[in-house]
Amino acid sequence: MGHLIYGHGERFEFDDRLLTHLRTVILAKLNLQESLVFTWSDERQHSIWLHPSMPVHFEFDQRTTDELNPAWIEQLLAHANSQGGLRLVEEPPHPS
């Protein structure tokens, strides 16, 4: 399990594979100087406001990351660009 570390040290745990895809989407938005809300649920529901001026750090348990699934990136980006913001969705089958 990896961690998304945001702001003043808030740590949120995610599976490394999921975190790899979240990193791609979040950094794409922040690179464009765009803010976004990210909402997910575990035992509780969480929402954080991601802003380009705030520090963000992705920490993985593994030394290397899995190959990206472009279909999953597209789905996550579509949510990130919507009014509801980025939220977790199941990974679709990897295109062959």
Image (tube, grey):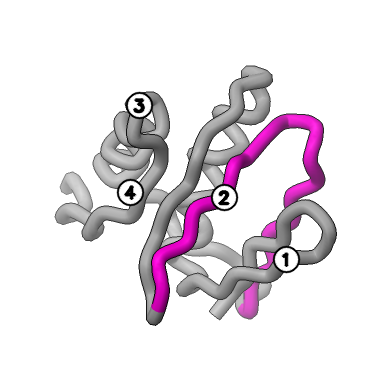
Marks 2 and 1: CB-CB under 8 Å? Answer: yes
| Placement of the N terminus among the 4 image quadrants | bottom right
Label 1: which residue? 10
Looking at the picture, does residue 93 appear above or below residue 14? above
Q: What residue is at 39 percent from the left and 25 percent from the top?
A: 81
Q: Secondary structure at mark 1?
A: strand
CA gap, disc 3 and disc 2:
14 Å
Looking at the picture, does residue 57 appear above or below residue 81? below
State the extent of the magenta-drawn residues as a range. Answer: 44-61
Q: What amino acid is found at the position of numbered circle 1 in the picture? A: Glu
Q: What amino acid is found at the position of numbered circle 4 in the picture? A: Asn
Callout 3: few (<14), some (14-19), or many (20+) C-alpha neighbours within 10 Å? few
Q: Secondary structure at mark 2?
A: strand
Q: What residue is at 34 percent from the left and 41 percent from the top?
A: 76
Callout 4: few (<14), some (14-19), or many (20+) C-alpha neighbours within 10 Å? some
Marks 1 and 3: CB-CB under 8 Å? Answer: no
Label 2: which residue? 48
Q: What amino acid is found at the position of numbered circle 2 in the picture? A: Ile
Q: What residue is at 42 percent from the left and 52 percent from the top?
A: 39
Q: Secondary structure at mark 3?
A: loop
Callout 1: few (<14), some (14-19), or many (20+) C-alpha neighbours within 10 Å? few
Give the percent coordinates (x, y) of residue 7.
78, 52
Say which quarter of the image contains residue 88.
bottom left
The circle drawn on residue 69 is 4
Label 3: which residue? 83
CA gap, disc 2 and disc 4:
24 Å
